[in-house]
Image (cartoon, rainbow, N blue to C red):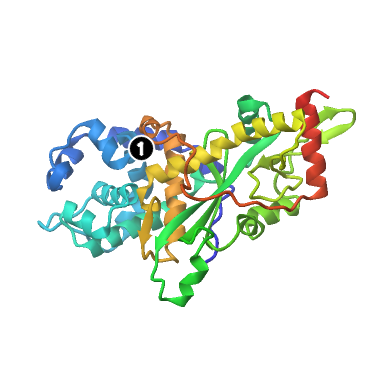
Amino acid sequence: MGPVRGFRKRKRAEKKVDALSSVAAADHSGDWWDDFSRRITGSLSLSKEVCMFESVFKMSRKTFNYICSLVRDDLMAKTSNFSFSNGHLMTIEDQVAIALRRLSSGDSLLSIGLSFGLNHSTVSAVTWRFVEAMEERGFHHLRWPNSEQEMESIKRKFEKVRGLPNCCGAIDTTHIMMCLPSADASNKVWLDPEKNHSMVVQAIVDAEMRFMDIVTGWPGSMAESVVLRNSGFFKLCEKGMRLNGKKMELGEGLELAEYIIGDSSFPLLPWLLTPYQGKELCESMVEFNARHSATRVVVQRALARFKDMCGIVQGEMWRPDKHKLPRIIHVCCILHNIAIDLEDEARNQTSVSPQHDSGYREQICNFDDKEGVAARDRLCRYLSGR
């Protein structure tokens, strides 16, 4: 049940994205989709239009082709040969399409199997092979920035939102709900404060809603602040190995170190600034909270879009494998980032609402580190011009 974390040191692989995308787009014509759609029963059987492709897979053909190019070698290296009920062997495109349909729709294995003329166990096997391949070949799409230039770009984009300087990211958590048998006493650990069985996902995003660090695998019974403290990100920050870049001069000999922002469910730390709490706040504190909230909405929208794009993590999952689920979540986050990296227009058709955890109340963490209080006050005074 170990947490899945973001990856680092992937710079070289990133440079291949545009080139591979172009090659993939050139190598595949519309013939595959025409042939594939004829094998699908029901409402999808007559779909050949591009818009229908995007509604089925929640991505463009360009992005689909790029993903195929990522996993092609791994899937072709496997010895298993999957086939449809009519005996036709699955191509790489077939396998990717089936896996993406499972991840994007969230439909049951049985339902997808019926649609594609497959046994539900085959759908499961194809999907898991895809997940394994994407973990191996797509990891460079989800990582913490590894250069000062990258981080400076992120800071500039955050500052453009509502003027928060030197901000490096926004953090939030969401719950992946699971349907588990209540009679099994071991499942009680998965009960969250809203009495749902769930798994927690902690995410840190940049100003473009790109995941830079994720942690998942922890049960819903764990408070968000506890998940944070058990994360690799927290440990790196406490050791001075992350958010340790260029400080900003505020004047009068004061400096502002790099930081991320989060809501009141997180502790106030020197590198994690949360809103002021209480009803009797001065004008500058109210203004700080407004700027903080308007900037923080980027992570709420990212998580909402992540769930919209990957329907498998939306709603209540029927008795999932709790050891495999963190890896599925991780791959869904990679797919979310790929859509951003390739500027996929289909992503604009998904939700921009900040509502990603409907029915969940905000948890409150009352821990305020003294240095965190001082850092927030310095920033508050700077923003108010005092």
Label 1 Cα crowd, 10 Å radius (few <14 / some 14-19 / many 20+): many
Q: Report x, y in % for residue 117.
A: 15, 55
- What residue is shown with label 1? 63
Q: Report x, y in % for residue 282.
A: 77, 31
Q: Is residue 370 left or right of residue 188?
A: right
The structure residue drawn at horizontal position 71% and vertical position 39%, both measured from the top left corner, is: 279
Quick check: 140 above or below 348?
below
Nearest the viewer among 79 and 41 is: 41
The structure residue drawn at horizontal position 51% and vertical position 50%, both measured from the top left corner, is: 360
Q: Can you say which quadrant of the picture contains the C terminus?
A: top right
Nearest the viewer among 203 and 265 is: 265
Q: Is residue 335 left or right of residue 42?
A: right
Quick check: 49 above or below 105?
above
Q: Report x, y in % for residue 107.
A: 28, 53
The structure residue drawn at horizontal position 74% and vertical position 33%, both measured from the top left corner, is: 285
The single residue placed furthest to the front in the displayed view is: 280
Amino acid type of disc 1? Thr
The single residue placed furthest to the left in the displayed view is: 86
The single residue placed furthest to the top in the displayed view is: 385
Residue 152 at least partly seen: no
The structure residue drawn at horizontal position 44% and vertical position 54%, both measured from the top left corner, is: 329
Nearest the viewer among 254 and 85 is: 254
Under tag 1, what secondary structure? helix
Q: Is residue 266 left or right of residue 257?
A: left
The single residue placed furthest to the right in the displayed view is: 252
- Report which quarter residue 325 is drawn in: bottom left
Q: Report x, y in % for residue 27.
A: 28, 36
